[in-house]
Amino acid sequence: MKYLSLIFFMSLLPQYAGKSLRRDGSHPRTFEDIKNEIAGYSDTAKAIIDLAVHGKAQNRSYERLAVFADTVGPRLSGSKNLDAAIQYMFSALQKDGLENVHLEPVKVPHWERGEEFAVMLEPRNHSIAILGLGSSVATPPEGITAEVMVVASFDELHRRAQEAKGKIVVYNQPFVTYGETVRYRSQGAVEAAKVGAVASLIRSIASFSIDSPHTGWQNYQSGVPRIPTACISVEDAEMMSRMALRGTKIVVYLKMGARTYPDSPSFNTVAEIVGNKYPEQIVLVSGHLDSWDVGQGAMDDGGGAFISWEALSLIKDLGLRPKRTLRMVLWTGEEQGGVGAEQYYQLHKENISNFDIVMESDEGTFKPSGLAFTGNAKARDIIKEIMALLLPINVTDVFDNADGTDINYWMRDGVPGASLRDDLSKYFWFHHSQGDTMTVQDPNQMNLCAAVWTVVSYVIADMEEMLPRGPRVRKSNKPEHSSFCGDLGLWLMETAELAIRMYCPGQILHFVNVGGDGEKSSDLQKASALLCFWKHSQKLS
Ligand SMILES: [Zn+2]
């Protein structure tokens, strides 16, 4: 798995500041003008909502997704199923009459779990449900039989390091938030191997469990032995923890046949509605087409992919053609750390000034609550006006910090970004598990998500001017310690901007940030950026 190294030369930021996007040299319009322009879309927004929620397109994104998910099944990077999924979408998008339907080749990791199982041998015979973690090595062919050491945290592991040699380390860390707890999945094997463990079993990163293991990507570190690693259910992790606390000796037999093959050819899938005035300018909507190899990948991220398709279909059905090009990208290799999206970014970044906004839905398509947005204050005010058009379905909130593995590359470079916000209360019940199937999805909720996605993307694509971009200007000059220390959701760029503004104006800051934890690598990057900045600011003050 690749590691991302991000070096920010903050002195480069002002290149975006105050850049006028007007082509004819006339005076920029006032916010009042923009507000009126957006209000003029209220009939169009109503028409989109009617068609998506009440009209003939009602339930379409759900029904399309059901056929797709039932036909293709799960779609792991490098698998035949993913190839089939891409071919399926390529012909479905053409049949739908969309424009410039094409595939952009990329290389993606190819890992297969093979046969795997675990059995508790002592104190009693018990079959342990496991899912090997992406990129894990296999056990030796005869498997590993070893005593278990249970820890609740990395701290405990380090405190009891001398006990770990030759053991299988079981992590029974409590679920706090995904962003905070996922490091046990991504780094658990490395930390266990550093103290001499022979394998690691990690309590699934899940907020609820019916004995279900939840897989995900994990990372090895150069110079540290590569030990086999898998996730186990919350129930088994808690049971082994109880046994260990009673002083009971636990012995587990682990067998894993995982293999990593050379990178595979794959594709990002693209379709467009070409703009009629500024066709070179892009409003990008997206979700990822790949998934884990369990369940159906209906929630992660079938829902996000199919509401993105639905946005283009609805606009086409209404006979609308925005001024800018509306481009849908269905990413490949997201679960391995945004691999398809990174290659897309490398290929298209020279055109970055033409990317108006990048949008991704990859955190469920449950009941929508609004839009998360990353961009400067002026752009945010515009987004708030656009979201007001969604009053008929009462989804008008604008939140901070858009998030999406696949769009972070662009947002990092100053392109405004948006992600769908929805009711996440059950998301981590199913995430990366056999439970991620169509049964989780709800047609009415998908209709509402599609309406939000379509209104936002269409209006941005059709407004006379692109969204302003550049550093955020905050109203308050007061340091926001709570968000520095408590909110890992802060986006890296915002953090860096705040750092400059509050603590060292005029200075050039170099953030060297090495991290990466697979699917949600951005969370780790944010966390280490926060830490990095915090240390830096302490030194300065
Ligand atoms: Zn996802």
Image (cartoon, rainbow, N blue to C red):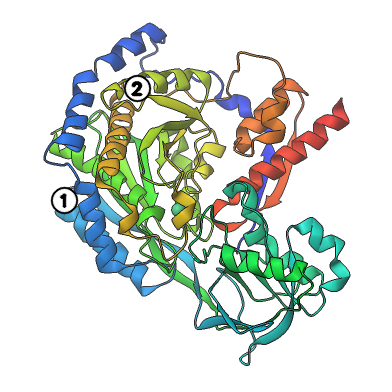
State the SS at label 2.
Answer: helix
Q: Name the residue under label 2.
A: 386
The residue depicted at 69 percent of the width and 23 percent of the height is: 480
State the SS at label 1.
Answer: loop
Pointer 2 and pointer 1: residues touching (CB < 8 Å)? no
The residue depicted at 11 percent of the width and 40 percent of the height is: 56
Give coordinates of residue 94: x percent, y percent. Answer: 18, 54
Q: Is residue 325 above or below residue 16?
A: below
Can the viewer see residue 487? yes
526 horizontally vs 165: left or right: left
199 horizontally vs 327: left or right: right
Give coordinates of residue 247: x percent, y percent. Answer: 79, 72
Q: In which quadrant of the rendered image does the N terminus lie? A: bottom right
The residue depicted at 41 percent of the width and 33 percent of the height is: 357
Image quadrant where residue 479 sits? top right
Q: Is residue 285 above or below residue 258?
A: above
Q: Which of 139 and 167 is in front in this view?
A: 167
Residue type indicated by callout 2? Ile
Q: Which of 163 and 277 is in front in this view?
A: 163
Q: Which of marks 2 and 1 is nearer the N terminus?
A: 1
Residue placed furthest toward the bottom: 142
Give coordinates of residue 423: x percent, y percent. Answer: 42, 40
Q: In this view, does 87 lie above or below 418?
A: below
Q: Name the residue under label 1.
A: 96
